Image: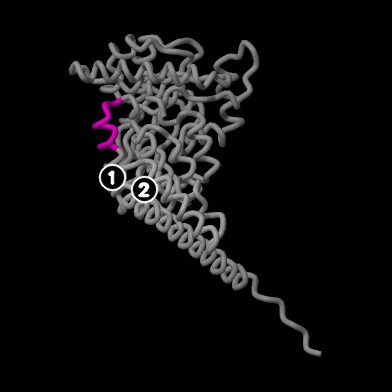
């Protein structure tokens, strides 16, 4: 009996890769097709209900249709499922946008997004999910941590937020306002009582993977205690990152105390050095992030930090009361938009947001 030759491992790996790739493509195609089916069904039912303009008529249609569809196709088409499809079509009325999103987002992603009350919040999460390819679990965590409320863009006037999301949707480059947030949630570091800046930095390095997740997609760690030599003096930047979407270095300084005006001068010094000696020819100017224990909004505004490419954000070393934080962010965004309406440019370094 002839011996069976061992398969060539390189060939076997290649064939396995082809199988896995095809499986992923088939799953993606199926997910996209199902999502579009649910949107079309929701849109058609919505249009039918609008003919009469009565809520009772719409409920009657759903009850009748679901009874027949469940009998023919199973419980996936019951009344609650059809109601969700109608809400889907109402929340995302543009079929072209839905078609694009369905290439990356599954129906399960949309189920997480639909309960959000604010249209801009829904658009933000959907677009960030598409760009950064979040899993359903990651999306759920981002919504739970009030990510939209914590981003700088949420503090802008609604027209500006809509324009930024539209810019991304059209294939434009992500802006710093979409990347940076305030506050940053660092409770996962498990910092001891009375910790020092060294303890904070060391904890971040130990759990760099989770820290990068909190920073957001696109960040790459470059250096710790980056040495900056000017003349005979050496200075040390706490952390240095690179953001591939922004195409720029990101300098991070850690402060245990609240933000102080002197912090701006220190960060400007680091940014000018990085711009002169470390920036590649195809990169944008470096940007700075000062992570501190707190910040006075008016003080931050008066410093005009955005013109210096500097962001200030608070970090939280414990799990906050989400409802309290949401209320604080909501109030902050109201103040920011009031200033914008008065002709004063809102500054993204303030904490702010709107109820999702």
> Could you tell me which residue is drawn at 26 percent across and 22 percent down?
307
> Could you tell me which residue is drawn at 43 percent across and 60 percent down?
33
The N terminus is located in which quarter? bottom right
Badge count: 2
On the image, the x and y values in percent for residue 227 come to 46, 26
- The extreme right residue here reads 1
Going by the image, does 69 lie left or right of 152? Answer: right
Q: Secondary structure at mark 1?
A: loop
Position above or below: 139 against 70: above
On the image, the x and y values in percent for residue 313 come to 42, 20
Q: Which residue is mark 1?
A: 172
Magenta-drawn stretch contains 157: yes
- Taking the image as drawn, is residue 278 in sight? no
The C terminus is located in which quarter? top left
Q: Which residue is mark 2?
A: 89
Question: Between marks 2 and 1, how big is the CA–CA gap?
Answer: 26 Å
- Mark carried by residue 301: none
Instruction: Find residue 114 and report its image quarter.
Output: top left
Q: Residues within 10 Å of mark 1 (few under 14, many from 20)?
A: few
On the image, the x and y values in percent for residue 178 come to 36, 34
Going by the image, does 148 lie left or right of 167? Answer: right
Magenta-drawn stretch contains 26: no
Q: Residues within 10 Å of mark 2 (few under 14, many from 20)?
A: many
Span colored in magenta: 156-164
Q: Nearer the viewer, mark 2 or mark 1?
A: 2
> Could you tell me which residue is drawn at 45 percent across and 40 percent down?
113
Position above or below: 205 against 235: below
Position above or below: 51 against 23: above
């Amino acid at each position: 009996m002839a011996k069976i030759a061992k398969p060539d491992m390189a060939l076997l790996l290649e064939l396995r890769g082809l199988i896995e790739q095809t499986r992923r493509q088939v799953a993606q195609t199926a997910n996209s097709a199902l999502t579009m089916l649910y949107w079309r069904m929701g849109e058609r039912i919505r249009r039918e209900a609008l003919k009469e303009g009565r809520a009772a008529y719409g409920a009657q249609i759903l009850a009748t249709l679901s009874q027949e569809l469940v009998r023919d196709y199973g419980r996936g088409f019951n009344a609650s499922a059809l109601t969700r499809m109608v809400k889907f079509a109402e929340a995302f009325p543009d079929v072209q946008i839905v078609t694009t999103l369905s290439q990356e987002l599954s129906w399960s992603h949309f189920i997480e997004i639909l309960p959000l009350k604010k249209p801009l919040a829904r658009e933000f999460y959907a677009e960030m999910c598409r760009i950064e390819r979040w899993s359903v679990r990651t999306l759920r965590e981002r919504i739970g941590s009030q990510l939209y409320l914590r981003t700088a863009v949420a503090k802008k006037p609604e027209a500006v937020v809509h324009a930024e999301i539209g810019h991304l949707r059209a294939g434009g480059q992500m802006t710093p306002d979409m990347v940076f947030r305030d506050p940053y949630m660092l409770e996962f570091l498990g910092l001891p009582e009375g910790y020092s800046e060294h303890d904070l930095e060391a904890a971040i390095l130990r759990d760099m993977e989770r820290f990068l997740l909190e920073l957001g997609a696109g960040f790459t760690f470059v250096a710790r205690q980056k040495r900056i030599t000017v003349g005979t003096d050496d200075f040390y930047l706490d952390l240095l990152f690179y953001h591939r979407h922004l195409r720029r270095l990101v300098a991070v300084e850690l402060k245990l105390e609240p933000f102080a005006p002197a912090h701006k001068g220190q960060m400007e010094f680091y940014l000018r050095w990085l711009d002169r000696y470390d920036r590649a020819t195809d990169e944008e100017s470096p940007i700075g992030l000062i992570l501190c224990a707190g910040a006075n909004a008016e003080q931050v505004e008066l410093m005009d930090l955005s013109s210096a490419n500097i962001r200030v954000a608070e970090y939280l070393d414990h799990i906050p009361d989400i409802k309290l934080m949401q209320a604080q962010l909501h109030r902050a965004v109201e103040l920011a938009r009031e200033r914008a309406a008065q002709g004063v440019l809102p500054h993204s370094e303030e904490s702010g947001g709107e109820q999702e």
